[in-house]
Image (cartoon, grey):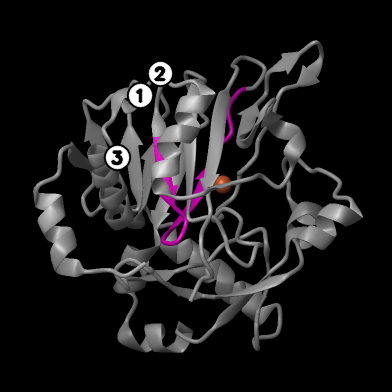
């Protein structure tokens, strides 16, 4: 995608939708928008706002699965999910996150996404963005927290930036599935073959405007190439601690009807636990294809 800074600014000034930041310098909440009746022009404006702000929130929506897929298609081509068994029947692009049981069987994945990570980092082309739509939410807990990885990179000293600029992370889906604390699922050899190890830069460039992100992650990372463990993973841990300081993070408290889309190219996120003996949570998750990090 070619980025023309000036034309984008002009378009944003004529935007058909209004928004406020989720926190100073990060995220955008779209005000008074009904995504069922959004015009193609307004959808394009939402996409432009999204590319610059790291996350986009639209509250009070009432969307069926077809409407979710149709709206998110404005952001790009939808991506299918790794574990098909948790997808909504007839909707391979909609993954269910839930602790609900129907006839004694789970309808989706429970406690998925606990721990700081960026989605699909174990693939050659990780997903560009993730959308969650809140169908049912606990009254307390189950927040999603985001870290602004561009703000974190900017905050590093020039010297530290230079030290990190050329480093590469080794990501492994197999390692992730074998070591994750929650929601352990046995992977079969087919899924293992479909998800070979990949290498991504530690410092990622945003393809839209060139801003740099300190693109760390946990779970899938086995090493920093060229720095033997434990030194390499200690450095990774130190960097994750750095980017997840309160000054770089935003905590989202869910309400039913929330649509939240985040940019995996420049954010890190984690789910948080909730009392699953007391509450039901049901979210629909959709992904948009991304490109190779550079
Ligand atoms: Fe996630």
Does the residue at mark 1 contact the one at mark 2 (Cβ under 8 Å)? yes
Q: Nearer the viewer, mark 1 or mark 2?
A: 1
Badge 3 or badge 1: first in the primary sequence: 1
**Dot 1 crowding, Cα within 10 Å, few <14, some 14–19, many 20+:** some
Q: Which residue is mark 1?
A: 36
Find out whether residue 108 is within the magenta segment: no
List x then y, in percent, for residue 203. Answer: 46, 76
Estimate the x, y position of residue 16 in percent, counting from the top left.
Answer: 15, 38
Left or right: where does residue 80 sit relative to residue 29? Answer: right
Crowdedness near tag 3: few (<14), some (14–19) or many (≥20) residues, C-alpha within 10 Å? many
Of mark 1 and mark 2, the one earlier in the sequence is 1
Verify CB contact (< 8 Å) between mark 3 and mark 2: no
Q: Which of these two is toward me, 99 or 247?
A: 99
Spatial distance from mark 3 to mark 1, Cα to Cα? Answer: 11 Å
Q: Is residue 169 above or below residue 184?
A: below
Q: Nearer the viewer, residue 221 or 79?
A: 79
What residue is drawn where x is 61% and y is 23%? 275
Residue extent of the magenta highlight: 260-275
Q: Please state if 226 lies on the left or on the right of 117 as rendered.
A: right
Q: CA distance from mark 1 to mark 2?
A: 8 Å
Q: Secondary structure at mark 1?
A: helix
Q: Where is mark 2, residue-wise?
A: 62
Give x and y (percent) for residue 14. 9, 47
Where does the image place residue 99, in percent across and percent down from the top left?
67, 23
> Which element is circle 2 on?
loop
Residue 232 lies in what quarter of the image? bottom right
Give residue 43's mark: 3
Residue depth check, mark 3 versus mark 2: number of the one nearer the observer: 3
């Amino acid at each position: 995608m070619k980025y023309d800074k000036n034309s984008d600014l002009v378009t944003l000034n004529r935007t058909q939708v209004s928004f406020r930041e989720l926190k100073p310098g990060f995220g955008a909440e779209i005000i008074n928008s009904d995504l069922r009746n959004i015009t193609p022009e307004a959808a394009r404006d939402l996409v432009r706002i999204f590319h610059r702000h790291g996350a986009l929130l639209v509250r009070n929506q009432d969307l069926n699965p077809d409407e979710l897929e149709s709206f998110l298609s404005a952001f790009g081509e939808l991506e299918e999910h790794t574990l098909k068994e948790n997808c909504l029947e007839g909707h391979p692009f909609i993954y269910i996150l839930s602790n609900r049981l129907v006839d004694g069987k789970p309808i989706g994945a429970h406690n998925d996404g606990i721990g700081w990570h960026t989605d699909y980092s174990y693939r050659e082309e990780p997903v560009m963005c993730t959308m969650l739509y809140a169908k049912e939410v606990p009254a307390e807990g189950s927040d999603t927290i985001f870290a602004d990885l561009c703000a974190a990179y900017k905050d590093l000293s020039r010297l530290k930036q230079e030290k990190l600029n050329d480093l590469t992370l080794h990501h492994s889906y197999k390692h992730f599935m074998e070591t994750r604390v929650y929601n352990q699922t046995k992977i079969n050899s087919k899924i293992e073959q479909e998800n070979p190890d990949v290498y991504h830069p530690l410092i990622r460039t945003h393809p839209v405007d060139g801003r740099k992100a300190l693109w760390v992650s946990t779970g899938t990372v086995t090493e920093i190439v060229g720095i033997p463990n434990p030194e390499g993973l200690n450095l990774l841990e130190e960097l994750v601690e750095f980017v997840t300081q309160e000054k770089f993070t935003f905590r989202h408290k869910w309400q039913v009807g929330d649509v939240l889309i985040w940019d995996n190219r420049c954010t890190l996120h984690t789910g948080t636990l909730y009392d699953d003996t007391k509450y039901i949570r049901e979210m629909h998750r959709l992904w948009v294809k991304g490109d190779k990090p550079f």
